[in-house]
Image (cartoon, rainbow, N blue to C red):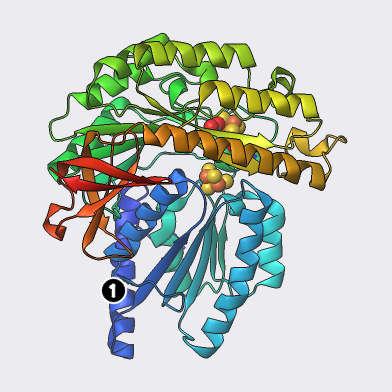
């Protein structure tokens, strides 16, 4: 029924539902005579981690308290589907939740969201085989969490709402950040690259940049609250600013006056007082401009760390992957970057066993790794994703061959990372202190601008500060340091 009280426009509509949920949660707390709790479990990438901060912001605004316990009153999984194993994990966990709901907490509301929910077959499975799941939504309507909870609390037993595309970007909703001193900031959503192995464009939708002023306003506000480090997030930040909207299948450019490139946006972020470190993720090599290299080299606030996924070293495989660069093109890009910033830390993602990958193709991957000498490389076994072009390739590489290649690659990657990290031995570095060490509470843990983890003695009052630490002893992938 049409209700005149409910605002039609966002974010007002969601604030209305947050208030209504708050009343209902309060009533429930009185009835049970205890606080109501929530637990968010996140799978997948930085984008999902940041989405979870938005979910938490809404859950706290409506009166739930966070706990690290999957028998909480509101349990939500923010899912990932980039590889099959990410996908499998969910069903295992769901069995556990069913049991908790039965034995530990009959009040539990179970919700699922994120990339996996954008797949029709998954939602169908949840619908038919997992009747105890109460709320299901996807990547395009995270902002509606309060409204969906409200519908559930007021009688709708199962609320399932999956949108095919993002119709709007809702700004100014609450967020609960994991750290008070660093934060992710979305600068764009979705992806238009359609790498042939990748499911992300299908589950995250078309590329869409946020307006620069909205981004800058958010970062200024973060700085005002004490945030020192921001991570600008997008599947392909180098194409930031090109597309404002694509949801109706035709490209709408950024409105006049708002049009800006990614390096120009970075420069504006550098101007914000209080922000001392700027990171970004991810850069697609095909769109990395000379202007970006120049801005990175000249702005001290931009961390000298670049994640530049190569995926494969074989030009043939890269073409089949639809990456739109060659082995030589990638290598000359790396040269250009290293000429401008000799000390930069380079990291990458590599896929082994893409359909049709020959031993020769794989040797090209080993070769590019040896030539670039990555500080760190994340290696993945190719995983067939239904609906992507590569999934229908007949020429899948046998499992034992892939495993053997994967192990050879891992050995090389680790040897090089070890060599690379040792180059910092004895240097004094600025460290952003992040937390008390999980194993030894006398130690603090922080990171250099190159993203190297350093543990050193100190007390918790330093958390959130940037301080000088000498890197004394390299232990594999991290350092033991000493405060100067
Ligand atoms: N937008 C980012 C990557 C996002 S997905 C980029 O283009 O760099 C993160 C990583 O997962 C990718 O870089 C790729 O290495 C890996 N990946 C994506 N799809 C995969 C698949 N089907 N099988 C194995 N690894 C995959
Ligand atoms: Fe996937 Fe390619 Fe888009 Fe990255 S750029 S999200 S790998 S399609
Ligand atoms: Fe996974 Fe979605 Fe990120 S599929 S890697 S959580 S964009």
Report the residue at 49% width, 86% height from top: 106
Q: Where ligand 2 lies, by quadrant?
A: top right
Q: Position of residue 113 (x, y in %)?
A: 52, 57
Name the side, left or right, on which 300 lies relative to 363.
left
Q: Quadrant of residue 192?
A: top right
Name the side, left or right, on which 244 lies relative to 24.
right
Q: Position of residue 419 (x, y in %)?
A: 45, 34
Q: Which residue is nearer to you in this view: 434 or 401?
A: 401
Q: How many marks?
A: 1
Report the residue at 69% width, 23% height from top: 364
Instruction: Say if 25 sits above or below 218 in the image.
Output: below
Instruction: Say if 269 sits above or below 32 in the image.
Output: above
Q: Which residue is nearer to you in this view: 192 or 131?
A: 192
Q: Which residue is mark 1?
A: 23
Name the side, left or right, on which 35 lies relative to 89.
left
For residue 17, say whether it is visible.
no
Q: Position of residue 284 (x, y in %)?
A: 51, 24
């Amino acid at each position: 029924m049409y209700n005149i009280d409910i605002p039609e426009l966002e974010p007002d509509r969601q604030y209305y539902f947050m208030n209504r949920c708050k009343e209902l949660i309060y009533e429930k707390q009185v009835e049970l005579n205890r606080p109501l709790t929530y637990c968010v479990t996140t799978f997948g990438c930085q984008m999902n981690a940041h989405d979870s901060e938005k979910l938490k912001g809404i859950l706290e605004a409506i009166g739930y308290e966070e706990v690290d316990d999957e028998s909480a009153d509101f349990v939500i999984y923010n899912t990932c589907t980039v590889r099959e194993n990410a996908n499998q994990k969910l069903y295992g966990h769901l069995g556990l939740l069913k049991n908790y709901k039965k034995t530990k907490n009959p009040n539990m509301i179970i919700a699922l969201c994120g990339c996996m929910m954008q797949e029709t077959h998954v939602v169908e499975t949840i619908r038919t085989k997992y009747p105890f799941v109460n709320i299901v939504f996807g990547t395009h309507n995270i902002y509606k969490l309060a409204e969906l909870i409200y519908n559930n609390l007021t009688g709708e037993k199962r609320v399932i709402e999956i949108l095919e595309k993002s119709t709007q970007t809702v700004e100014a909703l609450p967020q609960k950040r994991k750290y008070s001193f660093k934060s992710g900031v979305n600068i764009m959503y979705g992806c238009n690259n359609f790498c042939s192995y990748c499911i992300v464009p299908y589950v995250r939708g078309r590329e869409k940049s946020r307006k620069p002023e909205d981004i800058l306003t958010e970062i200024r506000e973060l700085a005002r609250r004490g945030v020192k480090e921001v991570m600008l997030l997008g599947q392909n930040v180098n194409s930031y600013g090109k597309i404002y909207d694509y949801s109706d299948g035709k490209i709408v450019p950024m409105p006049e006056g708002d049009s800006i490139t990614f390096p120009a946006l970075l420069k504006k972020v550098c101007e914000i007082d209080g922000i001392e470190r700027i990171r970004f993720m991810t850069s697609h090599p095909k769109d990395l401009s000379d202007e970006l290299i120049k801005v990175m080299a000249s702005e001290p606030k931009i961390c000298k760390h670049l994640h530049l996924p190569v995926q494969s070293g074989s030009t043939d495989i890269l073409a089949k992957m639809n990456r739109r660069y060659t082995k030589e093109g990638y290598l000359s890009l790396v040269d250009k970057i290293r000429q401008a910033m000799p000390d930069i830390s380079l990291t990458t993602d590599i896929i082994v066993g893409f359909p049709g990958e020959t031993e020769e193709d794989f040797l090209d991957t080993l070769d590019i790794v040896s030539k670039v000498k990555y500080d760190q490389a994340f290696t993945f076994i190719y995983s067939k994703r239904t609906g992507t072009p590569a999934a229908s390739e007949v020429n899948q590489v046998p499992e034992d061959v892939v495993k053997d290649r994967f192990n050879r690659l891992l050995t090389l990657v680790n040897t090089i990372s070890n060599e690379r990290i040792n180059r910092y031995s004895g240097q004094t570095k600025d460290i952003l202190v992040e937390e008390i060490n999980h194993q030894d509470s006398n130690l603090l843990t922080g990171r250099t601008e190159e993203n190297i983890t350093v543990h050193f003695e100190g007390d918790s009052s330093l958390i959130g500060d940037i301080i000088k630490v000498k890197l004394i002893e390299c232990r594999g992938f991290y350092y033991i340091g000493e405060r100067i």
